[in-house]
Image (spheres, rainbow, N blue to C red):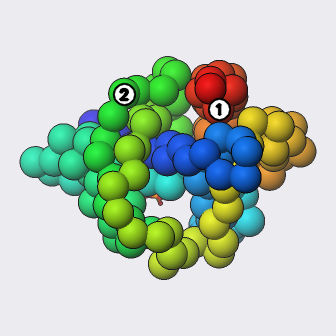
Amino acid sequence: MVRIVVAGAVIREWGGANRVLLAQRAYPPHLAGLWELPGGKVEEGESPAQALERELREELEIEVVGGDRIGDAVPVGDDLELRAYRARWVAGEPVAVEHRALGWFDDAEVVRLADSGEMVPADVGWVRELVDLLRRP
Ligand code: DCP
């Protein structure tokens, strides 16, 4: 059975640009040091939006509401399907509970991370849509 993994884009206007919150993975070794949209696996009985809200509460200590899909699903191996969603920030300042670091990246910085191989490979598939969102006024 294919397990769904949800990842959330929290976008905030800050320093004159729209920025997306990315998190630097600490594990497993082949992904450690790479940046991702934070998220995790959907548990039994959860909707994808509920899973996203729970994962961001656990991993970042923020409250969000799951929103629209971003881009296409990305298969990871034979047993995971990754989906990206908008995540509307409601409360809390992000804390790196499980990640090595957190950062707010504008459109050019997202492209640079993807081009330099510093983004989790699956997430590179969403860069075009993320950039479109970040360039909106
Ligand atoms: N993943 C990804 N890009 C993301 C989020 C996740 O490629 N933006 C991948 C990495 C892992 C898988 O999805 O192969 C599961 O992600 P996590 O380890 O973050 O998920 P959980 O925290 O739910 O997993 P676990 O409880 O097993 O640690």
Residue 9 at x, y = what percent? 50, 43
Secondary structure state at the residue bearing disc 1: helix
Q: Is residue 28 left or right of residue 50?
A: right
* Residue 68 disc label: 2
Q: Which residue is drawn at the image coordinates 51% and 75% (left, top)?
A: 95
Classify residue 101 by image quadrant: bottom right
Nearer-the-camera pick, 117 or 17: 17
Q: Which residue is drawn at the image coordinates 47% and 70% (left, top)?
A: 93
Q: Is residue 9 left or right of residue 132?
A: left
Q: Is residue 93 above or below residue 110?
A: below
Cα–Cα span, label 2 and label 1: 15 Å
Q: Are marks 2 and 1 in contact (CB under 8 Å)?
A: no
Q: Residue pushed farthest left?
A: 45
Residue 109 at x, y = what percent? 81, 44
Give the residue type that dot 1 points to: Leu
- Looking at the rendered image, the quarter that the C terminus falls into is top right
Q: Residue pushed farthest front?
A: 16
- Looking at the rendered image, the quarter that the N terminus falls into is top left
* Residue 118 disc label: none
Classify residue 91 by image quadrant: bottom left
Q: Which residue is drawn at the image coordinates 65% and 40% (left, top)?
A: 18
Q: Nearer the viewer, mark 2 or mark 1?
A: 1
* Residue 134 disc label: 1
Classify residue 31 by image quadrant: bottom right
